[in-house]
Image (tube, rainbow, N blue to C red):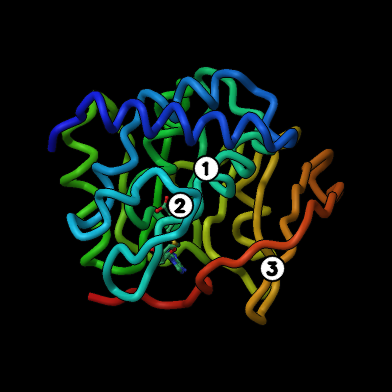
Amino acid sequence: MQDSFKHKGLRKQLIEELKADNRITNPAIFDAFFKIPRHFFLDLAFLEQAYSNKAFQIGAGQTISHPITVAFQTQLLDVKKGDKILEIGTGSGFQTCILCELGAKVFSIERQKELYLKAKKIIQDFNFNPRLSFGDGYKGLPTFAPFDKIIVTCGAPDVPQALIDQLKIGGKMVIPVGEGSEQTMKLITKIAENELITEELGTFKFVPMLEQVVK
Ligand code: SAH
């Protein structure tokens, strides 16, 4: 896929929109949004609109998250170079690449085979090496645990215990929680084995976190 002068211009505009939202303060996030062409992750039909602040269908009834949501979750995670991050819901792979661009070692799980394969192919075009898994994010990835950070990009009915268990002490998890059409963004810090601090940071709309894989 081509990354034209026009696409770069549209990306700059989108970044101005993200800057105008004063919740995003880490300049490395703006740089990552410039480096990762969002249109690579969308179907051809949506190319022209890739840089509007919208969610889009990516297949299998799923959506790529709004840019502002990706930026906000990334901001909350406070990504540091070398962080070991578990992402639940690879979807298009866009968020995965943003985290890789920020220097994280990313492990990402997707429950829809079609999307897992598609994201894998798209991410090959970048010089990143995230570990993509086809599986059920409710279980996390116990073999690779513990993680410095966990990001859930689908709406969970509750915070899965397996994910809390796989978070390092001192680690952070960003997870939208709620069963209806809207979820509350939660930032959870694990301060001791059985002690969490939970902050609530506004309302968002995500596709639901579902159990079991779709082959
Ligand atoms: N981070 C993605 C967001 C995609 S939408 C992006 O940047 O495009 C959320 C994704 O979570 C969907 O692809 C959906 O299939 C996936 N998902 C839902 N429940 C899941 C689960 N239990 N395990 C893994 N992925 C899940």
Q: Please give the label number shown on residue 141.
A: 2
At 37% from the left edge and 35% from the top edge, which residue is drawn? Answer: 97
| SS category of the residue bearing label 3 | strand
At 66% from the left edge and 62% from the top edge, which residue is drawn? Answer: 204
Q: Quadrant of ligand 1?
A: bottom left
Q: Please give the label number shown on residue 145.
A: 1
Label 2: few (<14), some (14–19) or many (≥20) C-alpha neighbours in 10 Å: many
Q: Please give the label number shown on residue 180.
A: none
Label 1: few (<14), some (14–19) or many (≥20) C-alpha neighbours in 10 Å: some
Q: In this view, which residue lies farthest toward the left?
A: 1
For residue 180, side relative to residue 194 (left or right) = left
Q: Quadrant of residue 212?
A: bottom left
The residue under label 2 is which amino acid type?
A: Leu
Q: Earlier in the sequence, mark 1 or mark 3?
A: 1
At 30% from the left edge and 69% from the top edge, which residue is drawn? Answer: 112
The residue under label 1 is which amino acid type?
A: Ala
Q: CA distance from mark 1 to mark 2?
A: 6 Å
